Amino acid sequence: MRAYPLIVGLSLISLSGIVFGAPAAGVATEGATAAGAASEVLAEPPSDLMVTVYRAPYRDSGSIDLDDLNGFALVTETRLVRLPAGVSRVRFEGVADGIEPSSALITGLPGRVIEKNRDARLLSPSALIASAVGKPVELLRTNRKTGSTERLPGTILSDAGGGVVFKTDQGIEALRCSGLPETFSFEPLAGLSARPTLSVEVQSPTAVTQQVTLSYLARGFDWAADYTATLSQDGKHLDLGAWVTLANSNGVGFPSAHAQVVAGKVNRVNGAGGEIGEVEPIDIGGPILAQCWPRGSTSDQPPMILREARDRMFKKSVAAMAPAAMSLQEISVTAARRVQQEQLGDLKLYRVPERTTLASRQSKQVRLMDQSGIPVGTIYGADLATAYRGAASTGAAHRLLRTKNTVANHLGLPLPSGTVAVFTAYNGERLLEHESGLRDIAVEEDVEIDMGESSDVQVSLTPEETSIDSGRAKLLPLVPGVALRSVKVEDVQRVEVSNARAAAIDFELRLSLPEGARIVRADHPLGTKNGRPLFRFKVPANQSVTVRFQIQAIGDGILRTP
Amino acid sequence: MRVRLLCIGWVTWLLVNPAEAADRALSVTIYNDNLALVQDRRDIEVKDGRQRIEFQDVSAEIRPETVSLSAADISILEQNFDFDLLTPAKLMEKAVGQEVTIVRVNPATGAETREQALVLATNGGVVLKIGQRIEVLRDDGLPVRVIFNKVPDNLRARPTLSVSIIGTHAGTRRATLSYLTPGLGWKADYVALYNESDGKIDVQGWVTLTNSSGTTYDNAQTLLVAGSPSQVVGAGQPNNFRMPVRRQNLQQPGTESGSRERLGDYYLYPLAERTTIANLQTKQVSFLDVHGVPAEHGYEYRNHWLGTAETPQSAQSIYSFSTSAHAGLGDQLPAGILRFYMKDKRGDPQFIGESAIDHTPMGSTLSLATGDAFDVKVQAIVDKRTRLSTFDWQTQMRYELTNALPRAVVVKLRQDGLWGDSSIKAESQKSTRLNAEAAEWSVSVPANGKTTVTATFETRY
């Protein structure tokens, strides 16, 4: 049940009698329902649409996953409603399938809406059967040989557990267990909608025509920024361009809508709704299963194997179906115009400048920015954890591009999170170098783009000595500010950084020491970054640099007991 | 199980008979925590002597042990809740040892042949005895219809409650059936529109009730109770874990009394009119609509003990307001979700985040986080950890606060995890010790600027 994406109808009832608005003008009454005196009124299709897409709340960086859009959107629809006098049920057809009903708001209806209802059922084979239980239906049974169809009046007794039991004059039978072509023919039923529908019950003393605004949060949307960075040949400048990629996996499209995306993390309670006792938002129903009694025969495989084989087959077919059903069918790219940014409280809102159509199962890209000539520094770095008497370790260094998000650096604008792909110019072409995630970066913040590992720059950590006599300990210069008392110096460690590149590189060696430990002697100047020791040095072209340091544990002997 | 019950629900939903509803009065009391009390008054026909009375359209998730039936001049012998559902497999299973009619259809001519058969077994496949022969049903794959004479007594399209009673005299009388059922629940949904220019909010409150109990309650008198009576469900689970400190939404509990009805210590929200609560339905009723309540917007950042961030982390965007009758919402708030909206430059309301609130008395101060601030960030750094003696440590913390907004902001910077044994030896600005666990600095960060706060803690670890 929960495996299906579900669909909703919503129905609101206004019992308030206060009505204001224009007198009778074009009243559309579409037949009274059997349930009550309410007449059914179909709201016009939206005359105006606004869709604001929010990112998946837990994603700090990276792109969207088209097969699983975990963001959401605020959808605002403006529709014309023609109300007759009296009680009427206004139906809003074609709302997003991912609607979160408890967030739905309707403004502009005459009077105060004091009751809203949401019924969750779409027209589907199983919903038809379910609604026909206990009601007269016609059984159609076709003779395969003669082609003649027998029509028998009957009653559906049960559709419990996926099987259907019905009764005719001849007795009680189960649907499609006989091997004969059997089906039901139903009488016309009210109350099942073909499209996700929201309905409102309103009481109006006079007939009115009114513009109504309906807004709701809906799942099945997402967006991210996709940056492409082109590094100049000398590696000193970067051109940064970005797309806003937004996507809609709902079965409903939003034609000619005002589209916005919002950057920043907003709180959602329970991710995207769904609490204990809460009704699933969308119920698209299922096929008529017509499960029968055990139908094993003498030639069957043992039931266990059969079941496993069937499960395997089912899984396979589901797996084969899933991507086709889930993945978005259309990718549309619109360029030339950029989104406009504005502040929305503590969030950033990006407005698509012109009305756009956000079709069903579509992803769309709109230009976010194009900045060029951003000065960047290239730094090679390694983050090493040192332990007392730790083992030797080697690895490749990471390359980082570093700049600051300022106007002077041709940036100075908020960078919403996403993915950044870095290209380098090569013989007049652009080649992809690396792709990494980017978090939300505010103005004046440092920007660091990970360029991956560089096999040309290797780092190795070697513990040289684990207990040093005091004479030899003094071979390394004391770190400024360190006053050595009579505490023993432990562990001399050596880090070698080799550079196979034809140019000198800037290197940052960052260490994480055991709790309470400090570096007391080192042959390179010692700094800190984010509270951790850091050596910053240059490695000349095609050469190696060795850094030696001594670590002292404070409260010696306590930490080291195994 | 759940799937099955939902299916039944559909059935039930459709079986609701208006004629039956006329002589039936339902009242439903719904508690917050997935629990409802249903009182079902209907006219029943009672004969003289011993008999069985069936109640259909009871909740598919009924807790049968909570059922009580009361009517004049009857005495109850026993209550049964039958949840054996009518499916083809069950129908066949119950036909074991009984005669059924089988109809063979000749695939060449389409001619039908009828025979009587005795069902011997249904283990894996159906084994029949026809005359003196034994056959497996449809072993050859040819079409065979099986016709049953009747539906066994306790197989039903939906769960049914039956009560055996002894009537002292025949006649129609009013019976009241009451029971508890899960599957019905409610919460509040609030919509708050924040006006940035004057710092005020308009708040609408809706109670949202949901029904997934598998049954429709027709034309029911509905009462919502803000509270969750304790329920004993299965074996209790002792929870000895020290839960992480949650952000406290309720800053100051209120002490005011409203005009709402109460039941014991619970607030009551009766629905004005009788209503139909359909299965799989979400129903919303307005209960609050307040305009122009002053609200404060601020920022908050909480750092856990020894928390070091490699990159600046966003502070939380906080909105606080009062539920007092003076300059507040003037009502107590049942637990639910509060969604904040704000108008964009074009004047369209946009969603800016939501927060869950607990039952909140009137007169309280609420402070709700709506999400992360894009432009206000904090980077907490453990600068130095020094061991003073075996158990005493000194920790130097540095907090870098940055603000990319064109206006100055104040961030409530909070260091958690101090337990009772930490003391602050030095700090760049005065902190408030909120409790044994946490210290807080109120840090002003200039427009497009930054502020650094440093503190030295001494702890026993």
Image (cartoon, coloured by chain):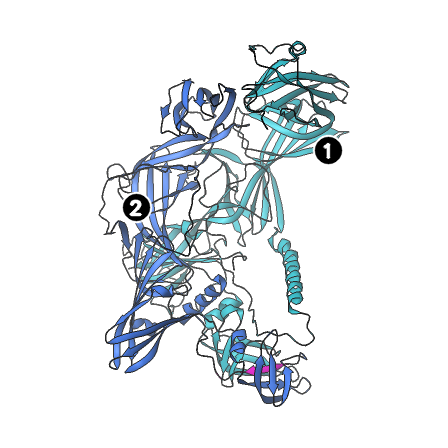
Chain colours: A cyan, B blue
Q: Quadrant of residue A433?
A: top right
Report helix, strand or loop for mark 1.
strand
Q: How many numbered marks appear?
A: 2
Residue A165 placed where, x, y %? Answer: 51, 76
Q: Quadrant of residue A200?
A: bottom left
Amino acid identity at mark 1: Leu
Q: Which residue is mark 2?
A: B289
Name the quadrant of the C terminus of chain A.
Answer: top right
Whether residue A533 is visible, yes or no, is yes
Closest to the observer: A358 or B177?
B177
Residue A157 placed where, x, y %? Answer: 47, 76
Report helix, strand or loop for mark 2.
strand
Closest to the observer: B236 or A363?
B236
Residue B356 placed where, x, y %? Answer: 39, 43
Q: Residue at x 56, y 66 (%)?
A: A287
Q: Is residue B149 magenta?
A: yes
